[in-house]
Image (cartoon, helix red, strand yellow):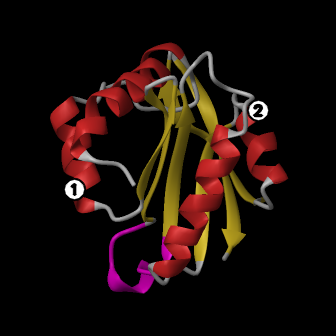
Amino acid sequence: MAREVDAAGVATIWNNYIRETAATFNSVEKTGQEVAAAIAANPCFLVAGAEGRVAGFATCFQFRGGVGYRHTMEHTVLVAPGVTGRGLGRAMMTALEACARGSAAHSLLAGVSGENPAGIAFHRALGYTEVARLPEVGYKFERWMDLVLMQKRL
């Protein structure tokens, strides 16, 4: 489980993806305070460590507002550059799915950039199924990008 002390490490990883990749359409970097607040508000905010630092994180949150969506969660999972390919993402997703089940989630959704084939393959390997492709709904780096929605029923 993530703790407030992990917020700066999580923000560092998240902001690298925001600045450098199309894995997220977000272009506004996260502050340590914002991440600390998200950790405090979310019982399913997990971190993985490697070599004495935060090496990755996974969290989930209600997919859409309203009581009718309370059992459907969307997640984020990111691993720091340099420590990918070691199974951290898979381990965090296994733990996150268990946490979500314990919080009465019925399914998890992944919103994956169409420009992130590795993210699509990662989720497919974990049992997620592509349920929708929304053309040109994201805009970053001066271009339109597709969003691929993938779902796993828990």
Q: Earlier in the sequence, mark 1 or mark 2?
A: 1
Name the one closer to the observer, 104 or 29: 104
Residue 36 position in % (x across, y down): 21, 43
Name the one closer to the observer, 73 or 142: 73
Residue 39 position in % (x across, y down): 28, 51
Query: Extreme left residue here?
Result: 33
64 to 105, vertically: above or below: above
Q: Does residue 70 appear anywhere in the picture? A: yes
Residue 81: image quadrant is: top right
Closer mark to the observer between disc 1 and disc 2? 1
Q: What label does residue 133 carry, if any?
A: none
Name the one closer to the observer, 2 or 52: 52
Q: Secondary structure at mark 1?
A: helix
Residue at the spot 71% in from the left edge and 58% down from the top edge: 132
Q: Is residue 70 magenta?
A: yes
Q: Does residue 134 appear anywhere in the picture? A: no
10 Å neighbourhood of mark 1: few (<14), some, or many (≥20)? some
Mark 2 — residue? Answer: 118
User: What type is the residue that disc 2 sits on?
Assistant: Ala
Q: Quadrant of the N terminus?
A: bottom left
Residue 31 position in % (x across, y down): 21, 29
- Left or right: where 144 falls relative to 12: right
For the magenta stretch, what is the residue range? 64-72
Residue 80: image quadrant is: top right
152 to 77, vertically: above or below: below
Residue at the spot 54% in from the left edge and 36% down from the top edge: 78
User: What type is the residue that disc 1 sits on?
Assistant: Ala
- Left or right: where 58 falls relative to 85: left
Q: Is residue 49 magenta?
A: no
Residue at the spot 44% in from the left edge and 79% down from the top edge: 103
Q: What label does residue 40 carry, if any?
A: 1
